[in-house]
Amino acid sequence: MRRERSARDERQVTVSLTGPGRELRRRAAAVPFRIMAATGLDEPELVALHRSLERPTAALDAASGLG
């Protein structure tokens, strides 16, 4: 990530990705598709799984003091 102050107004900072940051963003965009391929689940099934895990995850977080 690159940060540059505005020459006109030093209170403003422009933030942009570097080359490696753009490459990481490109690779990260493929993660959901790779998860679907690895699990054999389609998108509606993954959404259902995520929803079914929300309540027990929240309960575990609360029990551990994290939530």
Image (tube, helix red, strand yellow):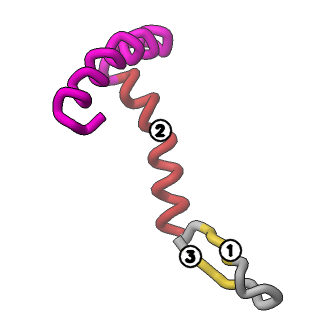
Say what secondary structure mark 2 lies in.
loop
Query: Percent position (x, y) of residue 28?
Result: 46, 45
Distance (Cα) linking label 2 and label 3: 24 Å
Between disc 2 and disc 3, whose residue precedes?
A: 3
60 relative to 7, above or below = above
Mark closer to the observer (3, 1): 1
> Which quadrant of the view contains residue 41?
top left
Residue located beneath label 3 in the image? 2
Mark 2: few/some/many CA within 10 Å (<14, 14-19, 20+):
few
63 relative position to 55: left or right = left
Query: Percent position (x, y) of residue 21?
Result: 50, 63
Q: Which segment is the magenta one?
A: 38-67
Residue located beneath label 1 in the image? 14
Query: Percent position (x, y) of residue 17?
Result: 57, 67
What residue do we see at 56% from left, 76% from top? 2
42 relative position to 57: left or right = right
Between disc 2 and disc 1, whose residue precedes?
A: 1
Between disc 3 and disc 1, whose residue precedes?
A: 3
Mark 3: few/some/many CA within 10 Å (<14, 14-19, 20+):
few
Viewer-nearest residue: 25 or 11? 11
- Checking the image for residue 30, the label placed there is 2
15 relative position to 26: left or right = right
- Amino acid on which the number 2 mark rests in the picture: Ala
Mark 1: few/some/many CA within 10 Å (<14, 14-19, 20+):
few
Mark closer to the observer (2, 3): 3
Do residues under tags 3 and 1 come within 8 Å of each other at their CB atoms?
no
Do residues under tags 2 and 1 come within 8 Å of each other at their CB atoms?
no
Say what secondary structure mark 1 lies in.
strand
